[in-house]
Image (tube, rainbow, N blue to C red):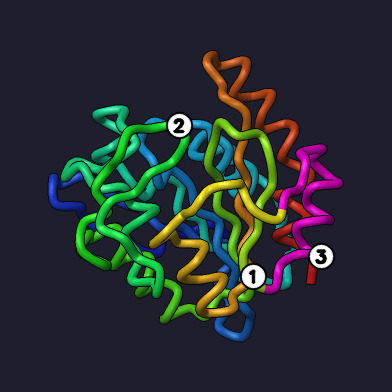
Amino acid sequence: MLKKINTWKDLFGNDIDLWCCPVRKSADNILLVARFHGDEPEGEFCLRKMLEELQNTTVSSPYNIYILPCLNPSGKKLFTRANGREIDLNRNYPTENFTAISVNPHTKEMSSGEPASEIETQIMMKLVQDYNFKRILSIHSDLHLIDYDGPAKELAKHFSKLCGYRLVDNIGYQTNGSFGTWVGVERKTPLITVETWHGETAQDMMKIWQELKPAVWNFCELK
């Protein structure tokens, strides 16, 4: 049974919702998360479709499936990569390689804030610490590939085969202070990062979901 587990407020009063299905104290936990960046709607669309399916499907997963569809509601409202405080949430983690400014080939220089300065980052860190996720799936957009961090190479290969996205060992530029570095590299939690292609229409969004759907379901059911 699908259940809303928690709702937090960001600094602008926007809701950040966490869902779970099924809810069994004896089961291990996994996490699906999207919209670290407010201008990347594809992942949130996919996870909301997943919520619809979980609501209407008998689930046989061995895991408690936690889903956080939109981590950055203030950036979503502004349709900006950063949150409402102009911080890149995927560069805000207190990693060994943290830098105050983030740079990548696709955007201008952006602030990373101070390590773990953002409430959205604090929420994610507490989730990881409290639920001890066995694996995490994070959905971003634009690069059209599969990346991974931590001990997730074989899992990422399987995911890549099911959805047809190419698998890379790294995306080709530094991601200082990223969630992947913090949770995958430093905490050794298997993390798959999906980068969808850029969708512009409702039809594009649905096509992306149909491409990812078999891999996402397998990720949730694979022990």
- Magenta span of residues: 151-168
The residue indicated by pointer 2 is 106
100 relative to 56, above or below: below
**Three-letter code for the amino acid on which mark 2 is drawn:** His
The answer to which of marks 2 and 3 sits earlier in the sequence is 2
**Where does residue 139 sit, x and y in percent of width and height?**
56, 46
Name the one closer to the observer, 2 or 218.
218
Q: Magenta includes 153?
A: yes
**Three-letter code for the amino acid on which mark 1 is drawn:** Pro
The secondary structure that most of the magenta stretch takes on is helix
- Marks 1 and 3: CB-CB under 8 Å? no
Q: Quadrant of the N terminus?
A: bottom right
Crowd rating for badge 3 (residues with CA inside 10 Å; few <14, some 14–19, many 20+): few
**Three-letter code for the amino acid on which mark 3 is drawn:** Glu
State the CA–CA distance, disc 1 to disc 3: 10 Å
Residue appearing at x 69%, y 23% in the figure: 207
State the CA–CA distance, disc 1 to disc 2: 26 Å
The answer to which of marks 1 and 3 sits earlier in the sequence is 3
Q: Quadrant of the C terminus?
A: bottom right
The answer to which quarter of the image holds residue 95 is bottom left
State the CA–CA distance, disc 2 to disc 3: 29 Å
